[in-house]
Image (cartoon, rainbow, N blue to C red):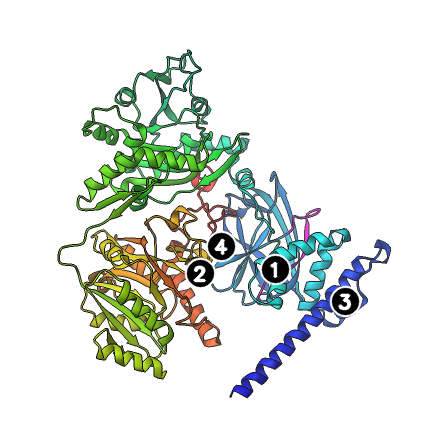
Amino acid sequence: MEWEELQAGLAKVQQEQAALRAAVDGLSGAIHALRQPPARRQGPAWLSKAQRLVRRPTLSLHPTPVSDVRAAAQGGWESTGWQPVLELHPSPHRYPSQWVHLELELRAEDVPWLAPRLLLNRGAGYVTEVRLPKPKQGRISCIVHLGQGNHGIRFVPFDRPGKFSLGRIHVRELSPGEGTARLLAEALRDEPETLPEVREQWKERARRASGGFLSKLKTGLVDIAARVPAQPPDYTEWVRRYEQLNAADRSAIRRHYERLPWKPRLSLIIPAAEGAAGQEPRAPRSLGAVLRQLCGEWEVWVVGGSETEDPRVRSAATLEEALRACEGEFVSFLEPSAHLPEHAVYLASVALNGRPSTDILYSDEDSLDSKGHRTEPRFNTSWDPDRFFEFPFPLGFALFRKQLVESVLDGRDSREAPKARELATQCLASASPQAVQHLPRVLYHSPLPAQEVEARWASETLEVRRECVQALHPAAQLSSDSEHSLRIRHPLPMSRPLVSIIIPTRDGYGVLRPCIESIRSKTTYSEYEILVVDNQSEDELTLSYLHSLESQQQARVLRYPHPFNYSAINNFAARSARGSVLVLLNDDIEVISEDWLEELVSQAIRPEVGAVGAKLLYPDGRLQHVGVVLGLGGVAGHLHRLEPDAQHARTRYTHQASAVTAACLALRTDVFKQVGGLNERQLSVAFNDVDLCLRVGELGLRNLWASHAVLYHHESISRGSDETPAQRSRFHGEIQYMLRRWGRALETDAFYNPNLTLNGTDAGLAWPPRVRTPWLSKYAK
């Protein structure tokens, strides 16, 4: 058997070497031809001959609208939003794959830039993006790598409203040698002297790729074909592309505002800016930003300022005087040097119309550098009290219903004058979570750097956060650190609940023993039982170890003599569990923090909480799990995976998540039974934990990621990757089930900002953002 495997391995290596030699020969010929003078540069003769011999048929692609696109009245197409998408149907009905030569005609009216790209569906939704070059004289002709297994192709012409025409779309499949050679020829066709630059770009892309030389070579070429920039566009370009308004936008905004059924009146309260020594306080800079609002019902109160000629601007001696006298339905506290975009009041009014029961509305924000350029965006999530009270995210532009503010003022015991950030924190603690709305728009530009803004919020609200948590959770133990974060330890009852730790395994002695020994030696929570589920182990070491666990009464060993089905195995064990709390645990987990189980259990037994996940690290200390993000990579994925720990706020503080991984997941047994356990019919291996958490969320419970429960995870040791055809088929079926069952929910994770990408794990910018543009025609009707 070993000799046969060795022969097969040698044959594979020989095939790869032959393919590499062919690719290098082709590239060398193309480079040699490109280095010749223009008169002699006719292309390699061998390439022309090969093209004639193996020329493949041309496929036509026919567009139909998917979203934000409609047929224009006078022919062509009209984009009605920021994400115009067309489905491309092949004729004949076979999607092209691998290397292709793409030709299409594209012209646009009144669009300052074009950003054409393809979106590919390889079974997990349209998550693979291939950027196309900008058209030259209305035509695009380029080499593209489409990969394998395409189930659909979509086309995005640009990222804003506008009219465009789309002519014929043809693709011709190429062999790998021709595709790579023509790609390089395309890159160097006009300027052979750019060869060093292209080589450096390829080296940078290949450096970031994993695998051996062939894998790096392919990755570099595919990235070039997809027009993946070596350095991604920055926030300045994102702002220019998606945040700037033109005259048509401003007119549409004013028209839409006039059609709103409710025009809420806002009272914006701003402290007067400090004047120079010996001078009176001066008008705050943010006052000008309010006066430049495109529309809206509002008034301004300047605290400590003087009267102005504008009847909408009034003054008050103190913050409380302004709050008592203002006439708005909602109140906002603004910094004197901050800036608001001109449509901030409009967007807030639209959001309130969408949810009239809102008591608190808050937006995203960024900072201004010394030149006034926007930088350091801070994208928030839906309201998350666990995260906010542990370490607050700044609320630069937020609206608070006046009745709520007045009730907080009336209930204050302190004789000290109220402060804006303290009042904001107390309002958040008093409001119903369902009445707090997040508006995913950058509507506040702070003159201070992000780190300073966050530090001020944390330090100025530390004591009031402590008071709020003590009022909400009287038995919780609180402690703070030098960064003014608040560690909240929720109480455990005197009679601690029994926890059933379920660990499936198969021939996993090498990881199972360290897992159980770390639990027994490091865990300070003593009320637990370990259930090891043996799934047809044959290894003698594993069988012997399982026997010793039973004989020494260190664990109960359950036998599951059926094919591997992760969901069925855990459901089987849960039926035998004696604990009121279940912990699903992989056999390749090792304990780091001794109080990991106290942390998970104390969170899981809170009546408003559902599933609770842990911080999982790779053995080298990099992050493996800080919560699951819906839509990431198509269905769901792990954010900040493989990044250093404690680099982001999301990795440092307990927060709400739509889902957490079952590699280490705590859940009350009654809740597990109420939702029917894991889905063992459609989700035997993948996404069963995501599906479980979403069903728990449908009960109205909040899923949490607990930052203080820390463990190692030797991921994929206990179960390999999906490599065989049967495994790939099963995985594809699980993807399709998730897409059918949860649909749009996978694109709208409430705890992941829609301005952030779903195409990577680094929480980078989304191009374009998945946000609604309400003044466009389809929303403004």
Q: Is residue 652 magenta?
A: no
- In three-dimensional space, the C-alpha distance between marks 4 and 3, rounded to whole angstroms, equals 37 Å
Q: Nearer the viewer, residue 318 or 553?
A: 553
Quarter of the C terminus within the rendering: top left
Nearer-the-camera pick, 242 or 297:
242
Residue 544 versus residue 628: which sits nearer the camera?
A: 544
Nearer to us: label 1 or label 3: 1
Res. 47 mark: 3
Mark 2 / mark 4, whichever is N-terminal? 2
User: Which label lies toward us, 2 or 1?
Assistant: 2
Earlier-in-chain disc, 2 versus 3? 3
Estimate the x, y position of residue 733 in percent, counting from the top left.
Answer: 42, 69
- The 10 Å Cα crowd at callout 3, few under 14, some 14 to 19, many 20 or more, is some
Q: Which SS class for mark 1?
A: helix
Is label 2 in contact with label 1 (beta carbons under 8 Å)?
Answer: no
**Residue at 19 percent of width and 51 percent of height:** 491
| Residue 766 rendering spot, x and y as whole percentages | 49, 48
Q: Which mark is residue 263?
A: none
Do the numbered discs 4 and 3 sit on residues whose CB atoms are within 8 Å?
A: no
Which residue position is annotated with label 2?
620
Eyeballing the image, is 547 above or below 597?
below
Instruction: Give the Cα distance between marks 2 and 3.
Output: 48 Å
Which element is circle 2 on? Answer: loop
- Range of magenta residues: 133-147
* Label 1 neighbour load within 10 Å: few <14, some 14-19, many 20+: many
Q: Element type at marker 3?
A: helix
Which residue does the numbered mark 4 point to in the structure image?
A: 760
Three-letter code, disc 2: Asp
